[in-house]
């Protein structure tokens, strides 16, 4: 994994720039949602999701990161409404950009609030 892409992703997310974050992904990138069973495919689908996420998450901050040959993990804390949420962004690299983003979040009560708010925003896009 190139550290440059993961660092650029982190910087874009931290400044709330969903488009810059999405531009780091390959055109055929895959997003695994913490709240939807089927993966989303393609950079543009990921772009719509990231745009919604930067509107839903409040007080977002990365608190740790871990790297290995298989990828890069960014641990974050945020709020969704009144719910505190912990999560990780798992990034895998590919030859044409970041190839995959998997997000996991906890606790369940915050995940259900996230699901409701994301569904509302994505239905309007």
Image (cartoon, rainbow, N blue to C red):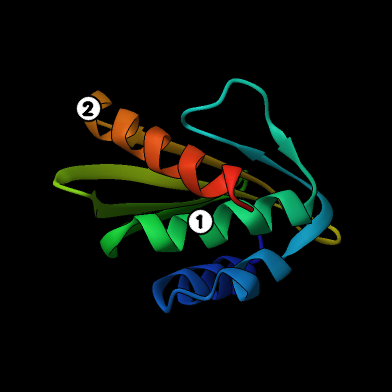
Q: Which residue is mark 1?
A: 52
Residues 63 and 49: in front is: 49
- Residue 38 vertical position relative to residue 111 in the rendered view, above or below: above
Q: Earlier in the sequence, mark 2 or mark 1?
A: 1
Q: Please name the residue shown 50% across and 38% down the image.
A: 119
Residue 74: percent from left, percent from top: 41, 54
Farthest residue toward the top?
Answer: 37
- Which percent across, then down, holds residue 45? 72, 49
Q: Secondary structure at mark 1?
A: helix
Coordinates of residue 58 in the picture (x, y in percent): 26, 61
User: For this rendering, which residue is in front, 18 or 74?
Assistant: 18
Provide residue 125's location: percent of width, then percent of height: 64, 53
32 in relation to 4, above or below: above
Mark linked to residue 109: 2
To which quarter of the image does residue 88 belong?
Answer: top left
User: 30 and 81: which one is in front?
Assistant: 81
Tell me where residue 115 sits by quadrant.
top left
Residue 8 location, quadrant: bottom right
Tell me the quadrant of the picture where the N terminus can be found: bottom right
Q: Which mark is residue 32?
A: none
Q: Residues within 10 Å of mark 2 (few under 14, many from 20)?
A: few
Residue appearing at x 76%, y 56% in the figure: 44
What is the spatial separation of the Cα atoms under label 2 and label 1, in whole angstroms?
19 Å
């Amino acid at each position: 994994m190139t550290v440059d892409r993961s660092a650029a992703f982190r910087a874009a997310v931290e400044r709330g720039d969903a488009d810059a974050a999405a531009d780091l992904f390959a055109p055929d990138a895959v997003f695994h949602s913490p709240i939807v069973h089927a993966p989303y495919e393609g950079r543009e689908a990921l772009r719509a999701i990231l745009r919604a996420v930067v509107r839903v998450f409040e007080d977002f901050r990365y608190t740790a990161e871990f790297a290995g040959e298989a990828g890069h993990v960014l641990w974050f804390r945020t709020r969704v409404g009144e719910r505190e949420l912990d999560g990780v962004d798992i990034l895998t690299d590919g030859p044409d950009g970041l190839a995959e983003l998997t997000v996991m979040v906890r606790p369940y009560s915050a995940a259900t609030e996230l699901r409701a708010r994301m569904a509302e925003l994505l239905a309007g896009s």
